[in-house]
């Protein structure tokens, strides 16, 4: 079978880019081979720190000759059209044929050797390769991730002629930088390539390096009575830093075990790429680490272990310093003071302002989750303080975790420490939820602030772009609401958020709104105790926060509330606004739609029937828990006999009403019990009169399953009625009454979900 | 391809295999090695700088098309890192060994590894790794791609292919190597405290040479400098950069080198104010932006003059 082997040998490729690069190489080759009609049996890319390799098998030696037909203009078209077409296809008028009055060009494409097509493909792939960052070297204009040194380009045993960026293709490569002979060697095919690499201390396959690392790391830790703490992300990274991985177990100074285990692990992982190790006797962190070297050292790694232990000590000494500095008395207040100078986002102001909004939201949520309001407010006030601590400055991923430790050390109430630590939860679908009531309140407030804030400045997720992880935040809110059974009105929280914007008023800063009826600003002194007039102003102003875009302006005036009830169109100072938040109404509509969308995705992921979701969402209801239980009830009903009855009964009614609606407006209102109605009609009216209040009551009690069963039980009576009478009766009064009956029934059937969405 | 043209078998190197190099022999060995590679061996620049890159021999010479090879030691001043001579790893004044090769030779990695061998690091025993680190210095608008080079987990060198300087993309890429001399020496001599380093082979330690300097300058940087003076001097320097660039003189072109000196001075004054905690978080970006703009003006002017010369 024919074989294609390409190796792009360069200086060290960043570890984080390697796996992506292998995927891109496969993808780009696959697309270009397909575009040229070149089939293959297999295609696989490999990557190591210094090489990006492609191995394909089963490519044809040549592509068959083909005739391509290109349609041209009509015979009747102006001559310019024909001239243009002839230029395009490179033929003369005589070489064209005419079919059904249209010029057709038949272009013969002779058989083409694959070997002739491959160099252009490789060139195209290299020049369009999507490295996250690329560079030039020396005086060349060629770009690659790091300087490109060699290219192997072998097809069917032959080196194909190729040159790019000053590098000419050959069948020669190099092995490990320090191990082996150090001499370049020739390869003839993939097998000899792999063997040559192995002989020269290179494991080509990323996954194979990963499994070697994992196996050996377990081996060296087990031999010392310890166990490796696995870390997949780290494993992937270190496999990208080695061509010949050799895990070694090093010793750490025991005195560092007094640091929180998260700190030790994070320092090991981020700075040094070490795996942490657990002591099997007590399950705690062991004073050891696993470093994966790239060298089979002649001293069995003694120097490497010594050197790495030394560096780790220096790193952890820094951590010990941060830990003791951070644990000073008054730390939380000092950090919060610093947050006033920390920008959260250029269009949203400071981190301290964000904290104010979170406090407002958390206080609103607290009673709903039965959390102590003042304790919740305290927890929210302290939740972000650790962002200004030295340890979190060094290791941002320890946000929350450090705050939790510092709160414990400062002897703050347990609930507060928990909330400070856990309010970022859940950080993904597999992360656990915050547990205590205070934690739940702050966690919800944190996420709802993030979402509202970015929606308010129109930074919503689009397509695959979600730089502020808003989808994850929304999913987090939904999980907390559902799993903790929290019933919250998102709109109420949005209102609270907008009211909290008053906190942006401060020295030289005023909050400004411009409603349809008036405009006004709240200045630095807005919150003084005032007269009735002031209170009325404040009430109007708060209402205004929900009726207009909200602006934060720079001001020199030392004023409190200033409202002008004459709207002056062209004199608004908003062009120079420091911050601008879109209006509540727009944001709230988008926010609710976004949540509905996220909830749909979530339910679909859980395997809920698509049509049940659509039916459930067709009922306007902003309560997430109710929406979910309606959908669940519909799904359960659809899986039972009730489902058929519901659908059959509803569909018959719906079809008739839709047909009648085309003739004119349907009558509305409750049906009357007419004296001489046929039995089937009297019976259905009677059943409807009984069932309607029963279903309404069940729906109000959120007993949707029972409501659906009650509706399903109407089917025999509906069938009997529709089989026994003609809805479209001659007597208009009778017809109207029957349509009213069916209309009322249809409405009742829609109490749980819009059944017309079911398939 | 594998021409080992870095085989400088000098006396210092031979010595390295038996006893580790003293601090000054480490410098002399590197000087000798890079001299063999055709570098101009320069002396430190005589204005306070925070990094060897800021020496005009690197930041300005990296611009334009003219080839250039230089190596030098540069004292680096980082006032906030002062620890009164008490911290074994941190200094407010330390040394960087800086090499710039323009255009970067094709075998720069091998040349670099040759320098490690020359100072006595055996690559069969020590784990040398090139770990991604894309270097950037926003104050001088410079950026590049490269690595931090690890020796047994310790960063010993910053290895960069310059892609831009002074906010402009370079015509010719330079290779820049920055060795942390104290760290490297601590590793070679296997000492845990920088003050215990052997400075020479005659019993003088690094501590004897520099501990008092660290104490006094730490105290000065954190306690005794006068913020008002620093601020005034900063503004003087800043104003003068523009003034110098705009002052007509007998040469008939702009005095970019003296102007650049003033940028360096402004930059150091900023670092001193920072050490006093005199820079509010909100002002910080604006200060850095001001220095960067001045630096950029100098870089652009220098590039234009190089083009014309």
Image: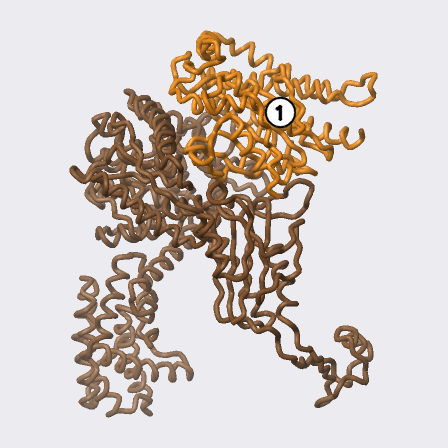
* Residue A68 located left or right of residue A196: right
Count the numbered circles shown: 1
Q: Is residue A438 above or below residue A694?
A: above
Taking depth in this image into account, of B167 and A584 the one nearest to the observer is B167
Q: Is residue A279 above or below residue A80?
A: above
Question: Is residue A130 among the parts visible in the rendering?
Answer: no
Q: Mark 1: which secondary structure?
A: strand
Of all chains in the rendering, the one displayed in orange is B
* Residue A566 located left or right of residue A374: right
* Picture coordinates of residue A593, whole percent (x, y): 39, 57
Of all chains in the rendering, the one displayed in brown is A
Name the residue at 30% across, 74% down.
A755
Name the residue at 29% across, 43% down.
A443
Taking depth in this image into account, of A513 and A607 the one nearest to the observer is A607
**Mark 1 lies on residue:** B71
Check the residue under mark 1 and report the chain it is in: B
């Amino acid at each position: 079978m024919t074989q294609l082997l390409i190796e792009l040998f360069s200086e060290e490729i960043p570890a984080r880019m390697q796996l992506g690069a292998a995927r891109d190489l496969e993808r780009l080759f696959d697309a270009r081979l397909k575009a040229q009609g070149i089939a293959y049996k297999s295609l696989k890319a490999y990557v190591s720190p210094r090489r990006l390799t492609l191995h394909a098998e089963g490519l044809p030696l040549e592509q068959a000759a083909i005739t391509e037909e290109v349609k041209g203009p009509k015979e009747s078209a102006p001559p310019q059209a024909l001239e243009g077409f002839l230029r395009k296809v490179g033929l003369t008028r005589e070489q064209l044929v005419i079919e059904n009055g249209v010029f057709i060009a038949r272009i013969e494409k002779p058989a083409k050797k694959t070997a002739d097509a491959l160099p252009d493909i490789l060139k195209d792939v290299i020049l369009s390769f999507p490295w996250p960052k690329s560079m030039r070297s020396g005086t060349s204009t060629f770009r690659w991730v790091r300087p490109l040194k060699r290219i192997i380009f072998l097809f069917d045993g032959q080196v194909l002629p190729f040159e790019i960026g000053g590098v000419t293709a050959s069948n020669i490569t190099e092995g490990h930088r320090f191990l082996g002979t150090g001499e370049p060697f020739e390869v003839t095919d993939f097998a000899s390539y792999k063997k040559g690499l192995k002989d020269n201390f290179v494991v080509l396959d990323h996954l194979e390096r990963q499994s070697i690392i994992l196996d050996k790391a377990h081996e060296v830790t087990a031999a010392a009575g310890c166990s490796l703490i696995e870390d997949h992300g780290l494993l992937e990274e270190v496999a990208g830093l080695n061509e010949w991985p050799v895990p070694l177990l090093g010793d750490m100074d025991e005195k560092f075990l007094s640091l929180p285990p998260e700190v030790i692990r994070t320092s090991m992982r981020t700075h040094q790429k070490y795996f942490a190790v657990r002591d099997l006797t007590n399950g705690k962190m062991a004073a050891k680490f696993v470093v994966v070297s790239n060298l089979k050292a002649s001293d069995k790694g003694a120097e490497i272990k010594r050197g790495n232990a030394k560096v780790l000590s220096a790193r952890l000494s820094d951590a010990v310093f941060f830990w003791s500095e951070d644990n000073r008395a008054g730390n939380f207040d000092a950090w919060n003071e610093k947050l006033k100078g920390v920008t959260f986002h250029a269009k949203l102001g400071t981190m301290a302002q964000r904290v104010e909004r979170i406090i407002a939201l958390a206080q609103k949520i607290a009673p709903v989750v039965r959390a102590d309001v003042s304790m919740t407010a305290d927890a929210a006030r302290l939740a972000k303080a650790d962002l200004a601590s030295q340890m979190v400055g060094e290791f941002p991923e320890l946000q929350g975790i450090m705050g939790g430790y510092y709160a414990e050390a400062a002897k703050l109430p347990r609930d507060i420490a928990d909330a400070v630590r856990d309010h970022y939860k859940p950080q993904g679908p597999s992360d656990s939820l915050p547990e205590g009531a205070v934690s739940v309140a702050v966690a919800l407030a944190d996420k709802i602030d993030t979402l509202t804030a970015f929606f308010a400045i129109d930074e919503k997720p689009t397509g695959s772009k979600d730089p502020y992880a808003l989808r994850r935040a929304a999913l987090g809110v939904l999980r907390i609401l559902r799993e903790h059974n929290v019933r919250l009105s998102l709109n109420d929280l949005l209102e609270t958020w907008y009211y909290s914007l008053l906190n942006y008023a401060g020295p030289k800063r005023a909050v400004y709104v411009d409603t349809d009826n008036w405009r006004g600003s709240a200045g630095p002194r807005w919150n003084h105790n005032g007269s009735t007039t002031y209170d009325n102003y404040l009430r109007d102003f708060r209402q205004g926060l929900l009726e207009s875009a909200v602006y934060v302006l720079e001001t020199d005036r030392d004023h409190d509330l200033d409202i002008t009830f004459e709207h002056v169109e062209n004199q608004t100072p908003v062009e120079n606004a420091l911050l601008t938040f879109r209006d509540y109404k727009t944001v709230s509509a988008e926010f609710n739609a976004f949540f509905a969308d996220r909830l749909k995705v979530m339910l679909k992921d859980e395997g809920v029937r698509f049509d049940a979701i659509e039916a459930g969402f067709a009922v306007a209801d902003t309560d997430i828990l109710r929406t979910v239980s309606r959908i669940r009830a519909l799904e359960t009903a659809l899986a039972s006999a009730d489902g058929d009855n519901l659908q059959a009964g509803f569909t018959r009614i719906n079809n008739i009403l839709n047909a009648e609606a085309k003739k004119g407006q349907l009558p509305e209102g409750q049906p009357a019990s007419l004296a001489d109605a046929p039995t089937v009609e009297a019976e259905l009216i009677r059943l409807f009169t009984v069932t309607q209040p029963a279903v309404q009551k069940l729906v109000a009690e959120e007993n949707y399953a029972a409501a659906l069963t009650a509706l399903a039980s109407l089917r025999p009576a509906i069938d009997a009625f529709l089989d026994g009478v003609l809805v479209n009766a001659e007597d208009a009064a009778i017809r109207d009454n029957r349509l009213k009956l069916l209309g009322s029934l249809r409405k009742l059937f829609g109490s749980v979900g819009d059944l017309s969405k079911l398939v | 391809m594998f021409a080992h043209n870095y085989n400088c078998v000098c006396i210092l190197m031979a010595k390295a295999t038996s006893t580790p190099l003293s601090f000054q022999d480490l410098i002399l060995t590197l000087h000798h090695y890079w001299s063999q590679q055709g570098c101009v061996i320069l002396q430190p620049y005589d204005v306070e700088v925070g990094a060897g890159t800021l020496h005009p021999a690197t930041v300005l010479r990296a611009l334009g098309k003219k080839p250039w090879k230089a190596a030098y030691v540069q004292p680096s001043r980082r006032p906030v890192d002062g620890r009164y001579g008490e911290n074994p790893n941190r200094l407010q004044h330390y040394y960087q060994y800086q090499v710039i090769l323009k255009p970067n030779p094709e075998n720069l990695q091998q040349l670099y590894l040759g320098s490690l061998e020359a100072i006595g690091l055996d690559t069969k025993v020590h784990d040398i790794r090139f770990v991604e680190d894309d270097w950037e210095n926003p104050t001088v608008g410079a950026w590049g791609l490269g690595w931090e080079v690890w020796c047994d987990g310790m960063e010993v060198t910053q290895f960069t292919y310059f892609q831009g300087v002074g906010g402009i993309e370079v015509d010719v890429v330079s290779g820049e190597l920055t060795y942390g001399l104290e760290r490297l020496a601590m590793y070679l001599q296997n000492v845990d405290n920088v003050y215990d380093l052997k400075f020479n082979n005659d019993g003088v330690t690094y501590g004897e040479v520099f501990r008092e300097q660290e104490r006094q300058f730490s105290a000065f940087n954190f306690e005794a400098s006068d913020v008002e003076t620093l601020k005034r001097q900063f503004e003087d320097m800043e104003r003068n950069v523009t003034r110098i660039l705009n002052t007509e003189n007998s040469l008939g072109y702009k005095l970019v080198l003296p102007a650049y000196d003033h940028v360096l001075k402004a930059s150091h004054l900023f670092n001193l104010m920072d050490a006093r905690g005199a820079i509010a978080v909100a002002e910080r970006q604006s200060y850095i932006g001001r220095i960067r703009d001045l630096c950029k003006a100098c870089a652009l002017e220098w590039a234009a003059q190089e083009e014309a010369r």
